[in-house]
Image (cartoon, rainbow, N blue to C red):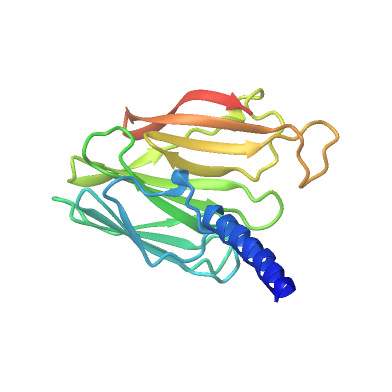
Amino acid sequence: MKGSSGSFGVAFVIAAVLAAATACAPDATTVDSTESEPAGATATDTAASGPAVAGTAFAQTLELQGITFRVTCPNDSSAPALTIVPAGLEIDNSPIVRRVEGHVVHAEVADLNVDGSPEIYVYARSVGRGSYASLVAYAANDKKSLSEIYLPPFTDDANAARGFRGGDEFDVIENTFVRRFQVYRDGDTDGSPTGGWRQFQYKLAAGEAGWILRTDKVVEY
């Protein structure tokens, strides 16, 4: 009986250690705060997120500050038709139809300039080598109608475009619009960049005939 009691004591200690380790382990489900929608925003019916996949349709309804955007794209060709249907605007809720380069992979709502009227940002990615990102975006004007948001090409600046071979991605972080990509050094092979990341941070501002995302800063890490 003494030997059995000793074995039982060892087993009890091992079980206690395993239970403590399990209790201290982090939950396997984590949420990246940079991917979450802004306060008050809702999104439903998400399809096709991540790399563009031929034939995978995109459909999502997003709402912020009482304005709803229904975003759909069949992603059935290299230049499919994107449709944005707003609801809740006081004057003009006409659908917007635009051809995109590649496939729609994600959409977000935000209020970057904190004026009480939301914007809709739709991200597309080209099909094939390079996987270049493009943006279709609109801002609500005092919740009455929509005007297009223009994102100037950074490739006009040789220094800013240095080491760029595609693979760029968009994101909304708090009140900033972000575009980032991995930088290629001379001699790097496609798919294996070693130059770190370059990130462009933009602020939304009024333009001459709509809205524009103006470069606020460029950081590398």
Q: Position of residue 112 (x, y in %)?
A: 33, 36
- 164 vs 207, nearest the viewer: 164
Q: How many marks?
A: 0
Indicate the quadrant where residue 110 lies: top left
Image-based side of 181 in relation to 59, left or right:
right
Q: Residue at x 50, y 53 (%)?
A: 30
Task: Determine if residue 171 is in view.
Answer: yes
Q: Position of residue 177 (x, y in %)?
A: 44, 36
Task: Determine if residue 51 is in view.
Answer: no
Indicate the quadrant where residue 161 lies: top right
Q: Residue at x 69, y 33 (%)?
A: 196
Q: Position of residue 212 (x, y in %)?
A: 38, 32
Q: In the rendered view of the protein, which quadrant contains the C terminus?
A: top right
Q: In the rendered view of the protein, which quadrant contains the N terminus?
A: bottom right
Q: Position of residue 11 (x, y in %)?
A: 67, 67
| In the image, residue 181 above or below residue 26 | above
| In the image, residue 154 above or below residue 8 | above
Image-based side of 125 in relation to 209, left or right:
right
